[in-house]
Amino acid sequence: QQCPSCSDPTLKDPGGVYIRCVNPDCPAQIRQRLEHFVGRDQMDIDGVGPAVIDQLVSAGLVTHLGDLYKLSIFDIRRLDRMGPKSAQNIIDAIDASRRRGMARVLAGLGIRHVGTRAAQVLAQNYESVEKLALVGVEELTGIDEIGPIIAESVHQFFSSPAGRETIERLKEGGVELRSLSPKRTAGPLSGKTVVVTGSLERFSRKEAQDAITAAGGKAAGTVSAKTSFVVVGADAGSKADKARKLGVEIIDEDEFERRLKTS
């Protein structure tokens, strides 16, 4: 089948029902990506709605996300029903979006399966989009809340020519690609990667993970050779078994509490 917008061939999702155009220059795709990118939970560019986007794409002013950051007030004034004040407000909104930071950029890129929460998690684990782009699937899968499907999708995006070009153009446009997320503070678990498995008596899973982060450590969801130690509670399963096979230290809840308080 052909895309009705650009006439390029379409592909069906493997194992899925959706038929997608894979031409990165397809006008319909560009419009869709722009609408997502400027959304409130992404780059939050007020005033750039579907009608404005349609005109920008139709006029050839924007053919890529990075082109938003090349627009001048004169470009905006050329659009229908666009007065000087409205044009200036759009330029100001675009300028303000440059400073949203890594999590907002990731949420706005349209990477499949990467929503607001996954973008925040990634920004908490890597200091910049450029650093994230160098990470492999195995390491990404080891991040708590980032499963294999998200990890594969992120890796594919940053490994693709289109993905690399997108980041380069945003960088050229002055978009902040560093993380603005709170960094892990120094503490008893600084430099430690900790996995919690099974049911603890005095911590919920989230409370344990928050305690690890507050102590300067990194809470991971998957055991690997890089894991510092595994906290094992009742009914622990495969993660404990994997830790034993890899020779990773296993501790109980009492020892976990002790390590949260001492170096």
Image (cartoon, rainbow, N blue to C red):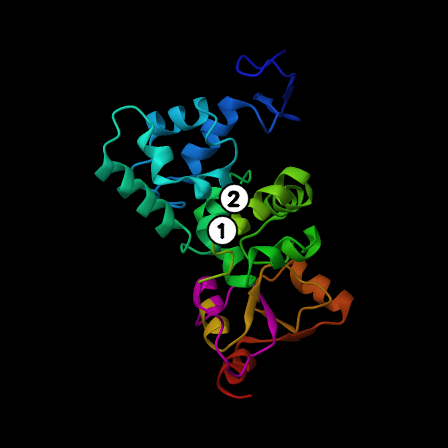
Q: Position of residue 232 (x, y in %)?
A: 59, 69
First to last magenta residue range: 181-209
Mark 1 belongs to which amino acid?
Ala
Q: Is residue 49 above or below residue 120?
A: above
* Disc 2 residue type (three-letter): Val
Image position of 183 with respect to 97: above or below: below
What is the total number of numbered labels drawn onto the structure image? 2
Q: Is residue 186 magenta?
A: yes
How far across and down, in percent of the image, does residue 209 sit?
49, 67
SS class, disc 1: helix
Q: Please tell me whether residue 223 is drawn above or below residue 54 in the rendered image.
A: below
Which quadrant: the C terminus?
bottom right
Q: Quadrant of the N terminus?
A: top right
Give the residue drawn at x 55%, y 63%: 127
Residue position marked by numbered label 2 in the rendering = 114
Q: Could you tell which of marks 1 and 2 lies nearer the N-terminus?
A: 2
The numbered dot on residue 119 is 1
Name the residue: 39% across, 24% down. Answer: 54
The residue lying furthest to the bottom in this view is 262
Whole-number angstrom distance, CA of label 1 to CA of label 2: 6 Å
Find out whether the residues at labels 1 and 2 contact each other: C-beta distance under 8 Å.
yes
In the shown orientation, is residue 52 left or right of residue 142? left
Instruction: Decide whether the magenta segment is chiefly helix, strand or loop.
Output: loop
Give yes or no for residue 136 being in the magenta stretch: no
Residue 109 or residue 215, whichever sits in front: 109
Q: Is residue 69 left or right of residue 237?
A: left
